[in-house]
Image: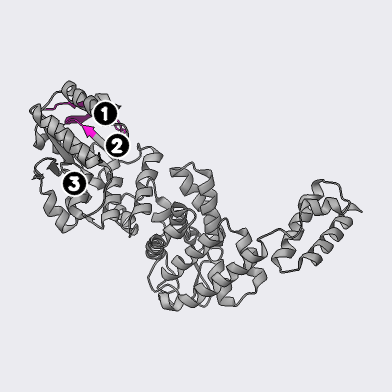
């Protein structure tokens, strides 16, 4: 039985007991938008919790996600089944709510606790009738996110971030009155993992993740969690290289270009974070030369520490943080070396420093296109970079010299082995043949032994 068939069977049994089962929330929203959503949320009205648990037990192995919240499920399916409830804030935290189950509260009161009108839509599972008490369908058609209720909405500050990521994912715009409510909300008590969770959804799922940050800027909500990004606003760039405008405008364009490339990356989320952070060093390095020209010398290196500060605020993932910092440090090199007509040795050294050479080239492409370079113009540079990458991969496919080679030559393992193998690796990157590399490495070791 498919999940939808199981949902219909549940609704039939609920109706037999005098109740009604509805699809609710994001499932109905996405259904009306023509988007796929495999997570099916159901709300059951008009029967007691005990009757519902009896019905669920008759359909399979029941699971409980939050019995006090009236949230249940069935093992081996993606149905989230809830009972109507009212909520009241009892603290400043995202989880500081007192919930009261009320299966007979009615669809109006059940829907009013939702965050946005487009998420307050309900659909009778058996009849297909859409229940729309708050104009959610009209807002869907207008691509507007409108909050439900000033007081209830303001009780949960995470809704500021949710609004921004919904706007990014669905290419919506927050209603002016919703922006005003969001401006007054304090996000400082939110846990970092919730901030990162909403950011990740925008970066991973939106075609234009820039909308997430544009909406946060409209809400004046960049200061506490994203101050490094706010500093990019009004930082000038040389117009001959950046006709798109300031560093803020450039970063958002790069972010959207990276979104079109992210599924090709070894770490899609890492690529998006690297695109977001790649120019964080510019506010502290931008200056004007004596002849009036703008420059941001060393912003790539300076941006590493700024990216560290930003990422540490919202995430504890050390591996991804290392990936992003590596990409920030190297992001200028591919296009710069290509423009200079550099030799293979320079390209191989660059690729060797990269955590992911393939991802570095994706970031370089996003950076160029985010500087208003036409795709057809960049195509030649991209092809040349791919050729250099192929040379690097061919040169490093198999190590020329190994520890076993050094032992075979009569040397005993020791601290000098590591230095010798690094020396051999540099020769290999430079294109020196294996025989010469081994010979020079052995000579290096003999020199160290004296």
Q: Residue furthest front?
A: 1
State which quarter of the image contains the C terminus: bottom right
Residues drawn in magenta: 81-103
Mark 1 vs mark 2, CA separation in Å: 10 Å
Crowding around mark 2 (Cα neighbors within 10 Å: few <14, some 14 to 19, many 20+) is: some
Q: Mark 2 or mark 3, which is nearer the start of the sequence?
A: 3
State which quarter of the image contains the N terminus: top left
Q: Position of residue 255 (x, y in %)?
A: 40, 60
Q: Position of residue 361 (x, y in %)?
A: 51, 65
Q: Position of residue 170 (x, y in %)?
A: 26, 55
- The reply to whether dot 3 and dot 2 touch (C-beta < 8 Å) is no
Q: Which mark is residue 28?
A: 3
Q: Mark 2 or mark 1, which is nearer the start of the sequence?
A: 1
Q: Residue furthest top?
A: 50
Q: Which mark is residue 60?
A: 1
- Disc 2 secondary structure class: loop
Residue bearing mark 2: 77
- Disc 3 secondary structure class: helix
User: Which residue lies at the image location 50% right of the left edge and 77% below the top edge?
Assistant: 380
């Amino acid at each position: 039985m498919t999940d939808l068939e199981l949902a219909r069977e549940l609704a039939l049994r609920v109706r037999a007991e005098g109740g009604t089962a509805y699809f609710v929330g994001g499932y109905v929203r996405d259904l009306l938008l023509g988007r796929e959503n495999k997570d099916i949320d159901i709300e059951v009205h008009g029967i007691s919790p005990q009757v519902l648990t009896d019905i669920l037990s008759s359909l399979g192995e029941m699971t409980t996600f939050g019995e006090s919240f009236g949230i249940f499920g069935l093992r081996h399916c993606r149905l989230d089944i809830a009972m109507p409830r009212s909520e009241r804030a009892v603290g400043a935290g995202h989880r500081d709510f007192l919930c009261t189950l009320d299966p007979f509260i009615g669809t109006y009161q059940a829907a009013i606790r939702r965050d946005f009108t487009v998420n307050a839509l309900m659909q009778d599972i058996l009849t297909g009738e859409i229940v729309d008490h708050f104009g959610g369908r009209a807002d869907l058609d207008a691509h507007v996110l409108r909050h439900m209720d000033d007081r209830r909405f303001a009780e949960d500050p995470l809704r500021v971030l949710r609004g921004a990521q919904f706007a990014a994912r669905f290419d919506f715009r927050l209603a002016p009155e919703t922006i005003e409510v969001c401006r007054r909300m304090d996000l400082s008590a939110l846990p970092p993992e919730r901030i990162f969770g909403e950011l990740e959804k925008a970066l991973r799922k939106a075609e234009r993740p820039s909308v997430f940050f544009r909406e946060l800027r409209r809400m004046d909500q960049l200061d506490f969690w994203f101050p490094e990004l706010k500093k990019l606003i009004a930082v000038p760039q040389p117009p001959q290289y950046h006709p798109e405008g300031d560093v803020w405008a450039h970063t958002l364009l790069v972010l959207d270009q990276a979104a079109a490339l992210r599924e090709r990356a070894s770490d899609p989320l890492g690529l998006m974070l690297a695109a977001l952070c790649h120019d964080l060093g510019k506010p502290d390095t931008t200056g004007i030369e004596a002849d009036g020209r703008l420059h941001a010398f060393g912003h790539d290196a300076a941006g590493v520490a700024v990216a560290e500060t930003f990422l540490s605020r919202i995430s504890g993932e050390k591996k991804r943080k290392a990936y992003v910092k590596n990409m920030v440090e190297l992001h200028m090199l591919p296009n710069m070396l290509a423009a200079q007509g550099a030799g293979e040795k320079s390209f191989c050294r660059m690729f060797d420093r990269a955590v992911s050479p393939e991802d570095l080239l994706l970031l370089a492409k996003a950076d160029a296109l985010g500087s208003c370079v036409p795709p057809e113009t960049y195509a030649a540079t991209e092809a040349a970079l791919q050729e250099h990458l192929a040379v690097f991969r061919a040169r490093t496919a198999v190590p020329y010299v190994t520890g076993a080679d050094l032992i075979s030559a009569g040397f005993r393992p020791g601290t000098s082995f590591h230095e010798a193998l690094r020396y051999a690796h540099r020769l290999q990157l430079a294109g020196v043949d294996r025989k010469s590399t081994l010979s020079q490495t052995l000579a290096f070791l003999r020199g160290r032994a004296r």
